Image: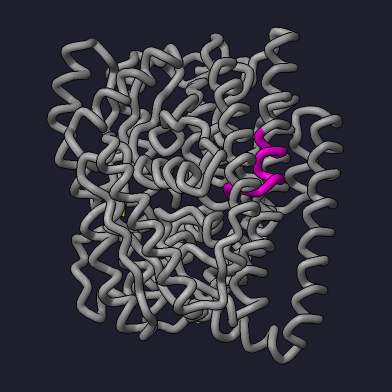
Amino acid sequence: MNDIVNKVQEKMGSLTDLMKGIWDDSLIEYLVHTPTTKDALMHLKYWAVNQANVLNFGRKLVSKVGLMGVKSILENNPWILYLLKSDTLVRRLAKGKTGRYHESICVLGEALHLGITELLEEMYFDPSRLVIIEDMLPPDLFQAMGLKVYNLESFGLFLPMLAPDSVLAYIDEAENAGVNPDSCSLPRATIGMVKKGHLPKGLAIVTSNLPCDSGMSAYSYYRRAFNLPIYHLDVPFNFYDERAEDFFVKDLKDMIAFLEQHTPGRMDWDKFREMCINRNRMLEVELELWDMLRVRPAPLAGEAIWLSHFWHYVVTPGKESSANYMKILADLAAANLEENTPATINENYRTLLWNAPFFQFIDIFNWAENNYGITILMDSLSYNHYEPIDVSTPESMLKGWGRVVMQGPMVRHNRGPAENYIDDLFRAYKQFDIDMVWVANHVGCKSSQSLNGMMREQCRAKGIPLLMLDYDLIDPRIVSHDSMLRQVEHFMDNVMKAKKLGQ
Ligand code: SF4
C-alpha cells in the first residue's frame, strides 16, 4: 500500500514540476511579470510578428515539399522540433528587462525567427543546389553563387541555447562510436548528428583548417560519411599579413572553380558586391553602437550586443535584413543615450567575456545582471578589427571577404601567436571601460586553455579582476549550471567583495 502511495506522490510531483515548467515558459506568465504594460504590449507585438513568420514558413514548406515531405523531413531531422522553442528563448533573454533594452531583445528575437526560417528554406527547399560549409565560413559568398548552404556545426551551438539537453544524444552517439570524449563537444555533437543521418546531404562540402585541430580533423569523418567532394581552404598561421591575404585569395578562386565544377552554382559578382556592401553597412552601424557602449552606464548591453553580432555576422551576414536589424539596435542605443537612459539601472560591473559564450547556459548573463548588476558589454566573438570591404573589383572583394574569414570569430584569437589572444583582450578592456574579465573556460578547448596561465599572470600584473569560469561549450553534464552560478557567486563574494542586489 505504501508503495502505491509513494508512486502516486512521485507521479504527482513530476506532474507538478511539468506544469510549473510549462507555466514558467509560457507567454502569459511572461506578460503577467513584465515590468510595465508598455513592455508587455511591445513583446506581444513582436510575438505576433514571429508567429506570422513561422506560419508563413509552414505554408511555404507544405506547398514546396507536400505534407508527406514535411513528415519525412521531421522524421529524418527530429532536432527541428527544438526550434519551436525560439519563442521561449526570447522570453528567457528578455526577462526582467524594460524599455528600449527590452525592445532590443524583441528585435533580436524577430531576427532569430526570420533567420531560422530562412536557414530551413536553404536546407530543404532546393537540394539540387545545396552545399555544406564549415561554421567558420560565412554563407554569403556561396549564396552569391546561387547556392543554398548551411553551416554544419551551427546546430551544435544554436540548439543548446534553445534547450541545454538538445544535443546530448548526439554527443553520446559520437563517443559511443569512438570519438575522444576529451575533445571539444562541438565537433562531437556534429559528428553525432551526421552519424545519425539527421542533416541533409547536399552536393559538396567546403571546409578549412579553422578554427582548431579538433574542428578541422572532424572533416575527414564528414567526407566519408556524406561521401561528397570536399574543398579544404588553407588559412596561413600568420594571417595578419599581406602575403597570407594574397595566398588566401588564390585559394578562394580555386574554391569557386571547385564549386562551379561540382554544383550548378556560378559566381555572380554583382550579387556578391551587394552582399559586401551590406556587410560594410553593418560594420559601420556596429562601430557606432560600440562607440555608444563606452558611455557608463551603457545604453545597451547583453545579448543585444553579443548575440546580435553572432547572429548577423556569422549566421546571416550579407543580408539586407541583418544590416537593418543592426541599425534598429544602434538607433535604440542612440535614443537611450540622448535621454540619458541606461540599458539597466543596475549597471554595477561592466564585464568582458573572452572565449565562446555559454551556449548551453546563456541565461547566466541575465541572472548575473539581475542578481549583481553585471552587464556583459563585449565578448571575444564580437570584438574584431574588420575593415570595410573594397567592392571595386572581384579581386578586392575576395581579399576583403577573405580577411573576414581569416579573422573570424575564435580564429582571430585562438590562432597565430599568443598576442592575438591576449592583446585584444586588454584593448577591449580599455575601450569599453571594463571592471572585470570573465574567461569562458571551455574545458574541451585546448588552444584557449593553453593560454590561461599567461592570461592570469598578465591580469594579476595589471590588477584586473579575472574570473575563469569553468564550463563546457554545449554539454551541461560536465559542469552543471548550479556549479557555474556558484563560481560567479564565489568570485563576486571573494574578489569583488560584492553582495547580491537587495541583500
Ligand atoms: S571551442 Fe575551441 S576546441 Fe571547440 S571548436 Fe572552437 S576552437 Fe575548437
- The percent coordinates of residue 26 (x first, y second) are 72, 53
**In the picture shown, does residue 452 fall above or below 359?**
above
- Asked whether 325 falls inside the magenta stretch, the response is yes
- Asked whether 109 falls inside the magenta stretch, the response is no
Residue displayed at 35% across by 60% down? 186
Task: Find residue 96 and report its image quarter.
Answer: top right
- The percent coordinates of residue 264 (x first, y second) are 56, 77
**Residue 213 or 336: which is nearer the viewer?**
213
Residue displayed at 20% across by 78% down? 178
- The percent coordinates of residue 295 (x first, y second) are 55, 10
- The percent coordinates of residue 267 (x first, y second) are 55, 62
**In the picture shown, does residue 481 fall above or below 59?**
above
Q: Is residue 133 left or right of residue 85?
A: left
Residue displayed at 70% across by 31% down? 327
Task: Find residue 37 and report its image quarter.
Answer: top right
**Residue 211 or 265: which is nearer the viewer?**
265
Residue displayed at 69% across by 8% down? 340
**In the picture shown, does residue 88 fall above or below 386?**
below
**Residue 118 or 156: which is nearer the viewer?**
118
- Prevailing secondary structure of the magenta residues: helix
Task: Find residue 462 and report its image quarter.
Answer: top left
Q: Is residue 275 left or right of residue 410?
A: right
**In the picture shown, does residue 29 fall above or below 267?**
above
**Residue 476 or 23: which is nearer the viewer?**
476
Q: Which residues are magenta?
A: 317-326
Residue 477 in view, yes or no: yes
Q: Is residue 353 left or right of residue 318?
A: left
